[in-house]
Image (cartoon, rainbow, N blue to C red):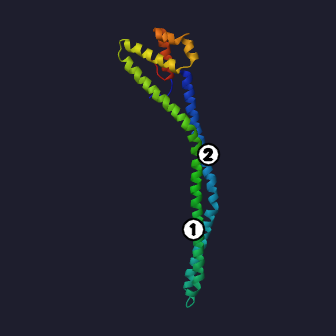
Amino acid sequence: MTLYAAAPARRSRQILGDLLFLTWIGAWIWAGFRARDTVLELAAPGHATTAAAGDIARRLRDVEDRIADVPLVGDDLTGPFGGMANQADGLAAAGASMVETVGQLALAVGLAVALIPVLLVAVIHVPVRARFVRRAHAARRAARQLSAAGDGAGESALSELFALRALANQPVRKLAAITADPVAAWRDGDEAAIRRLADLELRDLGVRR
């Protein structure tokens, strides 16, 4: 698989682009974790409420158990303590529910902060890189097939094919640097010009002859 162009300038741009993309991903993942941690700080009151209410409920039930041992009046006196313990349990459950809600919110915020910027760039960068890899792979396969003849005919066909692609794909300034009239050179079978045009296209596709 050819990931980068053979032309040094374009290869450098591709490598730099990939490094910047990876840096972009890493930066926003870090920002997502920071955002999540910031939101999770909102759960501190819920944790405190859950701990305090649970402790109160345990103490009230302990008192309830001790009062229940008092002869004759123990059962009558335990009622208020049991009711208060139940209310404390309800408060602890509310605190736990708040903690869970904040945790879900923190996860959603962290994912949104990390994924949205990454996806906005990925929808541009990834298709461009995938298209290059696909074209380079197809060009390499075609080059191998045409060169397999080994009798010069394949080499000539290879040059003509990729020279024609160069005429369609390459900037005019690059074509003009090879010959003043590249179309006429290809049409007239100028072997030197055709080979240089083909090499230009092959390098752009990440393939060396």
* Res. 31 mark: 2
Q: Earlier in the sequence, mark 1 or mark 2?
A: 2
Residue found at the far bottom of this picture: 72
- In the image, what residue occupies the spot 57% across and 52% down? 108
Q: Which residue is mark 1?
A: 93
Q: Residue 192 vs residue 89: left or right?
A: left
Where on the picture, by quarter, is residue 121? top right
Which image quadrant: the N terminus?
Answer: top left
* Res. 3 mark: none
Q: Position of residue 59 (x, y in %)?
A: 59, 75
- Secondary structure state at the residue bearing disc 1: helix
Q: Is residue 90 above or below residue 165?
A: below
Residue type marked 1: Ala
Q: Residues within 10 Å of mark 1 (few under 14, many from 20)?
A: some
Where on the picture, by quarter, is residue 172? top right
Q: Residue 39 vs residue 144: left or right?
A: right
Q: Give me the C-alpha separation between circle 1 and circle 2.
A: 32 Å
Residue type marked 2: Ala
Q: Is residue 185 above or below residue 142?
A: above
- In the image, what residue occupies the spot 58% across and 71% down? 90
Q: Position of residue 38 (x, y in %)?
A: 64, 52
